[in-house]
Image (cartoon, rainbow, N blue to C red):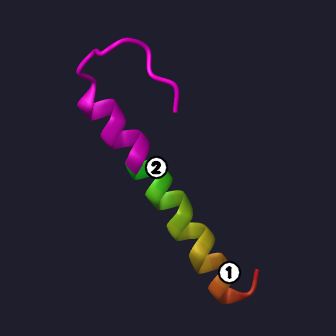
Amino acid sequence: MARRGKRPEAPNEIVIIGAGLAGSEAAWQASQMGI
């Protein structure tokens, strides 16, 4: 992930990280179901 400056945007980073975790979780569930 490219960073622009050192602005304290913790909420945005948390949202991005959360979205990444949700995406990987969905992908894992899909692979478990054999999709």
The image's mark for residue 7 is none
State left or right for residue 23 relative to residue 19: right
Q: Amino acid at mark 1?
A: Ser
| Corner quadrant of residue 5 | top left
**Residue 12 sits above or below residue 32 on the image:** above
Q: Residue at x 47, y 60 (%)?
A: 22
Q: Amino acid at mark 2?
A: Ala
| Corner quadrant of residue 10 | top left
Q: Position of residue 2 (x, y in %)?
A: 52, 25
| Mark 1 surroundings within 10 Å by alpha-carbon count, few (fewer than 14), some (14 through 19), many (20 or more) | few
Mark 1 and mark 2 lie on one chain; the one further toward the N terminus is: 2
**Residue 16 sits above or below residue 21 on the image:** above
Point out the residue furthest to the bottom here. 33
Q: Position of residue 30 (x, y in %)?
A: 66, 77
Point out the residue furthest to the top here. 5
Q: Residue at x 45, y 58 (%)?
A: 21
| Mark 2 surroundings within 10 Å by alpha-carbon count, few (fewer than 14), some (14 through 19), many (20 or more) | few
The CA span between labels 1 and 2 is 18 Å
Q: Which residue is mark 2?
A: 19
Q: Quadrant of the C terminus?
A: bottom right
Q: Secondary structure at mark 2?
A: helix
State left or right for residue 32 relative to residue 21: right
**Residue 18 sits above or below residue 24 on the image:** above
Q: Secondary structure at mark 1?
A: helix
Q: Position of residue 23 (x, y in %)?
A: 55, 58
Q: Residue at x 36, y 41 (%)?
A: 15
State left or right for residue 16 relative to residue 10: right
Q: Which residue is mark 1?
A: 31
Q: Residue 5 colored magenta? A: yes
Q: Position of residue 16 (x, y in %)?
A: 43, 40
Magenta residues span 1-17
